[in-house]
Amino acid sequence: MDVSKRPGLSRQTLIDTALRLLDEVGLDGLTVRRLAAELGVKSPALYWHIRTKQELLDGMADSIVQAAGMGPPRDGEPWQDWLARRARAYRASLAAYRDGARVVTNARALSPATIQAFEEELTAMVERGFTPVLALRTVATLSQYVNGFVLQEQSAPDAPAVPPSALLEDAGRSTLVTAVRETGTLRAALLDGGGSGGEQTFEHGLQVLIDGTAAALARTSNP
C-alpha cells in the first residue's frame, strides 16, 4: 500500500499532529523525521502533502491564528472593545502551544482563508472611519505587540512567578538586582507592583495602543 495514500493522512492531519507534538518537543525538536515517526510513516510520505518544514510551519501558524477567532466586530461592538478582545484571544491562542509565538513569527505565508478573514476585518474598520492604511497598520501593530509579548513570556516558561518586590528582598540575587536596589524611581516602581511582564503589563500596553489608535483616527477624521 502506498503510505502517501494511507487513510487519514492529509495536510491537515500533519499540521494537527505537528501542533500536538510541539508541546512535547518544542519548535527546535520538531523535525520532519520526528513527525513522520509520530504518524507511523516514512519521511517521504509527508512530502506528498507538505513539501518543506517551512510549509509545515506556515500551516501550523495559520491554524494558531485562525484559532484566535478572526473576524470583524460584532453588531454594535465598539472598535476599541473589538481590538481588545481580538488581542486577548490572539494572545491566548499563541500561549496555548509551546513556542506558539515563535511558530507564528517564523511563518512566511498564510492561507487564502486567513487572508480573507483579515480583509473582512480591515473592511469593517474602514466602515468605522479608518483609512485602509490606518486599519492595516493598527492590526499589524497590535499583532506584533502580542507576538512580542508572548515570545518574551515563552522564552522562560519555567521561571517562577515572583513578585518584583520579592526580588529586591532576596540577598542572594545577581549583581544586576543589587544595582537595582540602589536606584530610586525604579526601586519604588518595583516595590509598588511594577514589572515588565504579567497580566497588568499586557493590559497596560494594549490600552496604550488602543488610545494611540483613537488619537490617530481623530487626526485622520479632522486633518
Image (tube, rainbow, N blue to C red):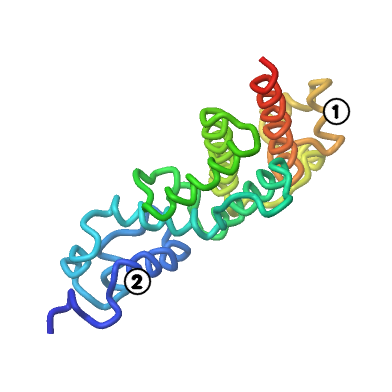
What amino acid type should be assigned to the residue bearing mark 2? Thr
* Residue corresponding to mark 1: 188
Q: Is residue 207 above or below residue 5?
A: above
- Residue 62: x and y, percent? 42, 54
Q: Is residue 43 above or below residue 134?
A: below
Q: Indicate the secondary structure of the residue bearing disc 1.
A: helix
| Residue located 73% across and 50% down the image | 76
Q: Nearer the viewer, residue 127 or 35?
A: 127
| Residue located 35% across and 46% down the image | 109
Q: Which quarter shows the C terminus?
A: top right
Q: Farthest front residue?
A: 127
- Residue 79: x and y, percent? 69, 42
Q: Residues within 10 Å of mark 1 (few under 14, many from 20)?
A: few
Quick check: 193 left or right of 94? Answer: right
Q: Which quarter shows the N terminus?
A: bottom left
Q: Nearer the viewer, residue 71 or 195?
A: 71
The quarter of the displayed image where residue 48 is located: bottom left
The quarter of the displayed image where residue 186 is located: top right
| Residue located 35% across and 68% down the image | 12
Q: Nearer the viewer, mark 2 or mark 1?
A: 2
Query: Of marks 2 and 1, which one's residue comes earlier in the chain?
Result: 2
* Residue corresponding to mark 2: 13
Quick check: 99 left or right of 211? Answer: left
